Image: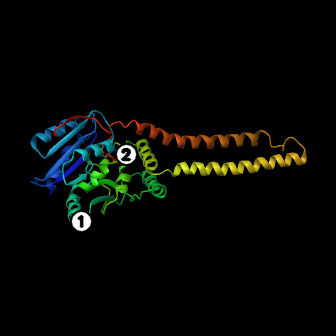
Amino acid sequence: MHLSLVIPCYNEEETINLMYNELIKVFEGNQGLEILFVNDGSKDNTLSEITKLAQTDERIKFISFSRNFGKEAAMFAGMKYASGEYIGILDSDLQHPPSMLPEMIKALDEGYDVAAARRTNRSGEAAIKSFFSHRFYSVINKLADVKIEEGAQDFRVMKRKVVDSILNMTEYFRFSKGIFSWVGFKTKWFAHGNIDRPAGKSKFNTFKLFRYAMDGIISFSVVPLRISLIFGIVVSIIGYGYGISIIISTLITKSAGTGYGYASLMSGLLIIGGTILICLGILGEYISRIYIETKSRPLFIVDKTNII
Ligand code: UDP
Ligand code: MG
């Protein structure tokens, strides 16, 4: 067996060594192993921690980006540079416990193509975060073409053929949870509880998570566009109906107005105006993505690496 473990790292100087020690415990003396750290433009000493380790253990490989490109890009780069027949992805903060890897690998040996991890409880997480996360899964599963398991993680081990199909998807706006599900293949799920970070802090704030959720929905669904069309049709039908009724009543009573005046005019105007702007905004989200995708810029730029 030749296993590559891809570990995206952004400002993880405190966790790199903890991670390495944990992996060594799990894979003691295993020669068919490659540990591939992807330094995603860290501003702290992450890179020097990695290079120090690489000097002591030749199973350690690294690629270091020229700037921060985001976790999605880091995972993509890691999969691209990985040489193993089995390829695993895990966070460097030990929230994806390496001790689960042996049974995940066993599942691949037994004929599964993917062994993926699901977080089944969110204890220790802010209630509001859990609430929105839960809503997100139910919305995306209703709107999108792909099914995403609640609590699905990026933590997984895949066979080479699965990784090759993921690498064929070179879209710029990457939403891996969707991509993993979109490519299919026989998947076995492994549940684990919530694990707190031993050191450092989360790189995803509320705003970043919101953007991530938006990217997920827009990448995998055109339903929002259809909703704006349906919304427009409904508003138009009501508008035409009401307009015609006003004209008819004016003709019958021969008076120039119905007496509603300023309030009715203004509220009508504002409601329609707001609706149009929302629909334009939805359209804009899709068009801006088309614009950026057509540039086909590279997903990441490598500055340093010890892979030849
Ligand atoms: N990460 C990355 N690039 C980024 C943000 C995060 O490579 O721009 C890495 C980070 O170092 C960690 C993993 O992605 O190994 C998950 O990040 P984090 O633990 O901050 O996210 P959370 O577990 O809180 O969702
Ligand atoms: Mg984490």
Q: Residue at x 57, y 40 (%)?
A: 280
Which residue has dot 1 on it? 111
Q: Work out whether mark 1 precedes mark 2 in sequence or the reverse, and give the earlier one.
A: 1
For the residue labelled by badge 2, is the local secondary structure a helix, a strand or a loop?
A: loop
Which residue has dot 2 on it? 174
Classify 10 Å Cα crowding around label 2: few (below 14), some (14-19), many (20 and above): some
Three-letter residue code for mark 2 = Arg
Q: Is mark 1 within 8 Å of ligand 1?
A: no
Give the quarter of the image for residue 209.
top left
Instruction: Locate residue 159 relative to residue 59 in the image: left or right.
Output: right
**Residue 123 is at least partly visible in this image:** no
For the residue labelled by badge 1, is the local secondary structure a helix, a strand or a loop?
A: loop
Give the quarter of the image for residue 55.
top left
Instruction: Locate residue 27 relative to residue 298 in the image: left or right.
Output: left
Q: Quadrant of the C terminus?
A: top left
> Residue 81, image x and y in percent?
22, 44
User: 249 or 191, which lies in front?
Assistant: 249
User: 171 or 15, which lies in front?
Assistant: 171
User: 120 or 118, which lies in front?
Assistant: 118
Classify 10 Å Cα crowding around label 1: few (below 14), some (14-19), many (20 and above): few
Instruction: Locate residue 164 relative to residue 266 in the image: left or right.
Output: left
Number of numbered markers = 2
Give the quarter of the image for residue 204.
top left
Tell me, yes or no, whether the two marked residues, 1 and 2, touch with CB atoms within 8 Å: no
Q: Residue at x 23, y 62 (%)?
A: 108
How much space separates mark 1 and mark 2, taking CA atoms? 28 Å
